[in-house]
Image: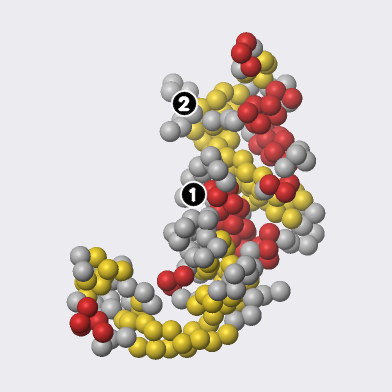
Amino acid sequence: MNIETYKTLKNFILCPICRHKHYFLHVVNEKYLCINCEYSFDFDKAEGLWEEESVDTINCDICRMELTCTSDNFLTGFPPPSVAIGCPICNDAKGDHHLHSHLVGIKYRNKWWPPTFFLHQKGKDGFHKIKGIRSKITFCILLGEAKSEKNIFFLTPSNMDWIKLLWVNGDAVGYYMSNLVHLKDAPDEPCLRQIYVRQSFRGMGNATKMILDFLNNNEGHVCIESPNEPILSILHKLDLLEKIANGKYRSKGRISFVYCG
């Protein structure tokens, strides 16, 4: 079910240079600053430019704070034409507008939807490449969850062609990302770059499914970037690694590890 909206009054100002609509103005060097064209407003000149309009508003599902559906509340990282709103009160990022904010709603096909709408699709199962806005939004939500976890740093990809989402019984379980990596004096090789499984779906073999899907779709030698202990354990169980001294592992030949800063 989509999120119901209601109307509230909100002040805004149009930049006299680029006509960008501001519901909030940044202050730099004791002047208002248009973030779109970097034009500076003197405080006294800006006071007479504010206007009022009626805008859509939703409530945070946790704290019930009113959140106007305006650009000052939009989060970064979601594919256009969709936009997303986070709550600054229930925000793990302490007010920064990033994917690991507490996500309240996403505008899709002119309606506001809760994140759960994009994480559940009845009858969807198996691995799917990202196609269309809805699946891009699903990935952005999963990436936001991955970034919010401690000690995890995942870059936002510029190309989604190498990403696969895993669905199990209609639930978005996670994703894996791969691409080609350039090795010195050798042809480019497939490289498994990221694996993310949502917390409630861990310990069920889903990471193993992702590794096997990657291996089955890339014959011959492959690379794996910066594997952690759980991934090393899976690779060992798949007979791709052997244990050596001091709890370390050695490849049996099919895989190599790459470490990127």
Residue position marked by numbered label 2 in the rendering? 183
Question: Quick check: 77 left or right of 103?
Answer: left
Measured from the top left, where is residue 101 in percent x and y? 52, 59
Alpha-carbon neighbours of circle 2 within 10 Å: few (<14), some, or many (≥20)?
few
Q: Which residue is mark 1?
A: 156
**Amino acid at pointer 1:** Thr
Q: Which residue is pictured at 67% across the width and 45% down the height?
A: 197
Q: Is 153 situated above or below 49? A: above
Whichever of labels 1 and 2 marks the residue nearer the N terminus, that label is: 1
Residue 1 falls in image quadrant:
bottom right
Q: Residue furthest top?
A: 245
Residue visible at 39% across and 84% down in the picture: 11
Q: Amino acid at mark 2?
A: Leu
Residue that appears at 67% across and 15% down: 243
Left or right, residue 38 beside residue 224: left
Q: Please say whether residue 55 is visible from this viewpoint.
A: yes
Residue under the image location 64 percent in, 17 percent down: 247
Could you tell me residue 74's position as x and y percent? Answer: 47, 68
Image spot of residue 68 (x, y percent): 50, 77
Where, quadrant-wise, is the C terminus in this rendering?
Answer: top left
* Residue 74 as seen in the image, left or right of residue 143: left
Disc number placed over residue 53 in the picture, else none:
none
Label 1 CA crowd tier, 10 Å (few <14, some 14–19, many 20+): few
| Numbered disc 1: secondary structure | loop
Structural distance between the alpha carbons of marks 1 and 2? 23 Å
Colour pattern of the rendering:
secondary structure
Any part of residue 190 in sight: no
Tell me residue 167's x, y (percent): 73, 51
The local secondary structure at tag 2 comes to loop
Front-most of residues 76 and 166: 76
